[in-house]
Amino acid sequence: MAPDEDVPTRLPLSGIRVADFSRVLAGPLATMLLADLGADVIKIERPETGDDTRAWGPPFIGGDAAYFLSLNRNKRSVTLDLSSDEGRSAGRRLALTSDVVVENFRPGLMERFGLDHGSLAAEHPGLVYCSLTAFGEGEGAARPGYDIIVQALSGLMSFTGHPGGEPTKVGVALLDVVCGLYASNAIQAALIGRGKTGPGARVTVSLFDTSVAALVNQAANYLLGGLVPEPLGNAHPNIVPYQLFETADRPIILAAGNDRLFERACEVIGRPELATDERFVTNAARVRNRDALIPLLSAELASRSAAEWLAALEAAAVPCAPVRTLDEVFASAEGAAAIQEIDDPARGRLRLVADPIRVDGRMPPARFPPPLLGEHTDEILAELEE
């Protein structure tokens, strides 16, 4: 899409410059959100190879993996060899002329480059400096922080999957995504704080800490109730029925989140007496007696097609859904509306998932496509000389 020349000046973060030393997923996601909201994000990459995710394919579009393209729109790319004096000098000048620095290098590396917070803040006290780490900065800080490692260490895998089956990871690097969202939020909070008090701040976001925070009710069930969660397949630990059911032709989700919705669901399936059965009359009772209730519901729902049940449940205002594949998702009206098409002179027209934030009811614009490796190096280095 062609950018609206007037839109960037109206975006909330217009005028903010971000020096983005991060790579892979959590950091680039955080900085892409800042870029979508108007920030000038300069992505610092290794010469020749760049961000690891450029090679994480197939599929590849114009030499870059789809993985990379999903995380780097609205950014400019500069290649700097930070192991060289020249590269470190340019990186430092860039950091000192930015409002925000984001990095997720292993501990000690930014200090070696002279790009650590203490070194930069001494010259630039207004700097907001965000470090994304795997396990914080104490003992174990140098341990590798891949998403699947933290899915295992955070406990998430221990109760994901089916009873009796192997522990299962979520089908996307969801904990990296959560970490990136926390980081973006922390950066914007620090910018607001700077606007009130003057000095910047150093914010750190740990992949492990954000992963544990993402356990929400499951963590609270243990900390407050002593319950160690176990795999429940597609069931919910605290709400029944709130899970997948097989119909005659394909699975559906039934989410009767309160007693009235359960009563309506029972009416739809032709078993109204279940809603007054003392074993099932409240959600707490249904949770205690799920092993008795679920087979009764399953037997009824297996008797008709998904389309029939979904039509009847929706007519009764009972939350329900088919389990879609991705092709079905993007063929739907709401899925199609989530796509942003970006004109890319080097790669052709790109169809990517848009930023879900709306500013004054409008989708943040795709001001420019994900950058080619080093595409803006000359331009950015020239700016540093001005």
Image (spheres, rainbow, N blue to C red):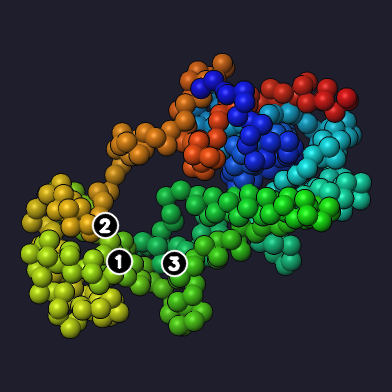
Point out the tag, 3 or 2, that comes first from the N-terminus: 3
Disc 1 to disc 3, how far (Cα)? 25 Å
Residue ranking furthest to the top: 345
Frontmost residue, 104 versus 126 = 126
Residue 144 point in image, percent of width and height: 64, 55
In front: mark 1 or mark 3? 1
Residue 358 point in image, percent of width and height: 51, 41
* Pointers 1 and 2 in contact (C-beta within 8 Å): yes
How many numbered markers are drawn? 3
Q: Is residue 236 above or below residue 336?
A: below
Q: Residue at x 71, y 57 (%)?
A: 204
Q: Please name the amino acid that badge 3 sits on.
A: Ser
Label of residue 158 in the image: 3
Q: Secondary structure at mark 3?
A: helix
Residue 195 point in image, percent of width and height: 77, 50
Point out the tag, 1 or 2, that comes first from the N-terminus: 1
Label of residue 319 in the image: 2
Disc 1 to disc 2, how far (Cα)? 8 Å
Residue 207 point in image, percent of width and height: 61, 57
Q: Which residue is mark 1?
A: 257
